[in-house]
Image (tube, grey):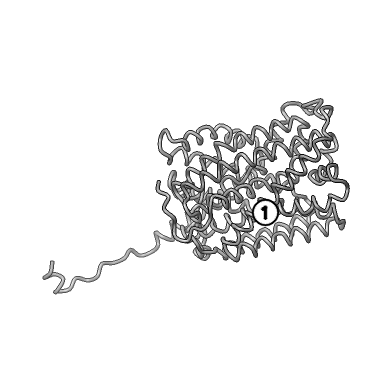
Amino acid sequence: MSDHKPAGGRLTAAHGTALYVGAVLGTGVIALPALAADIAGPASLLAWLGLAVLSAPLAAAFAALGARHPDAGGVSTYARLAFGERAAAVAGWCFYFAIPPGAVAAALFGASYVSSALGGGAVTTAVTAAGLMLTVTLVNAVGLRVTGRAQFLLFLLLLALLTAAVALSLPHASTEYLRPFAPHGWAAIGPAAALLVFSFAGWEAVTHLAGEFRRPARDLRRATGAAVVIVGVLYLAVAFAVVAVLGPAAARSDAPLGDLMALGLGGGARPLAALAAILLTLGTMNAYYAGAAKLGAALGRDGVLPAWFAQGSTAGETPRRSLFFVSALAGLALLAVTVTGTGAVPAVMLSSGSFVVVYALGVAAAIRLLPRRSAGRAAAWAALGAVLLLLALSGLYLLWPLVVSCGALLSVRRNRARRARRPAPQAAPETEDSAVAA
């Protein structure tokens, strides 16, 4: 695979690292350590460790696919190349329609830190969440150049803030909080891992932007390697600090990162924690809106979504139609959650179930498409068993990707019927001159 620069490609390996870290890191750090501790106690650390280990082969497989087949369609493109039109439609729809509930969960997690620091309860949370969604939409609407630079700045700020929060709070850690290690039984690690899938969703997101890199084959590998190390270390450090510093109180915390920073820096640090949560949330949502917008344009280009979505599918263009559609769906989902008061956890699980289906299709495509004895194909085989286990752990939340998959297959059937009804192009009538020439 050559390192030829696609037309319009502007992102570097540094931008790619920031996009990866932003896509994977954000809301997992600010909310889910406490929820996982509530499910499995200190044993939730094993769920974090297992998913961190899974990330390495999974990210390597997706990076190898992105470098070999740089296209805005991402996993959808890989599924089409490996298994055909139906698989591509399922992968594309599952990813695309996982973004609205995932964006709602991310925005609510970040907004809860603001309401915790400033007060105002549900009203502050809802207004802040809506503001986050609007900000990310506008940032992406101005183009990927701004997106990449903004993401890199967020990455540097977040790395400093999280490192400070963990380092300053660890002196308050106690080994007593690690006993009993599995208060709810070892079987509780499985449900905790199913919840934490949302934290590690993101390794496939940047593949939709592969065509925007200057040299996809080189830059994607470098970005992936750096991001896997950074994300793994930060997740494990923060999760350990939440369990060992906060103890049983972690299971009842709505803002665990804020509690850590308050212990390390004093009670006045809660506004700083709210700032960190906002930055983390913006990083996650920024990467996902960018990837989803490109994917929607590619699906429109390929006929899986209406042709109206195809605007912006070429590398270097901004897919504003697809972006605004995703943003509008996320806004409606936020309105529904706010009115019904269901909270963010169901939205997390709906997104996680969809992402696991995308992972399964992506890993299977990597096994089919990547060269034999290549590192990427070996990574895909290593990730396959873990992805199948995650599918089993997702349980009833696979109903949402099942419904979405049915919609995708119906769209394929409708497109095929439409193509079949089109009259075949007729040859021009033969003239006397053409007959003589023949």
Q: Position of residue 281 (x, y in %)?
A: 70, 52
**Location of the C terminus (image quadrant):** bottom left
Q: Residue at x 83, y 37 (%)?
A: 246
The vertical placement of 343 against 45, above or below, is below
Residue 412 visible within the image: no
Q: Residue furthest left?
A: 436
Q: Nearer the viewer, residue 241 or 171?
A: 171
Residue placed under numbered mark 1 in the picture? 154
Asked if residue 87 lies left or right of residue 320, the reply is left
Q: Nearer the viewer, residue 414 or 313?
A: 313
Q: Residue at x 14, y 74 (%)?
A: 432
Asked if residue 227 lies left or right of residue 77, the reply is right
Q: Residue at x 69, y 48 (%)?
A: 26
Secondary structure of the residue carrying numbered label 1 = helix
Asked if residue 278 lies left or right of residue 14, the reply is right
Q: Position of residue 183 (x, y in %)?
A: 80, 27
Residue 283 visible within the image: yes
Q: Amino acid at mark 1?
A: Leu
The quarter of the picture where residue 190 lies is top right
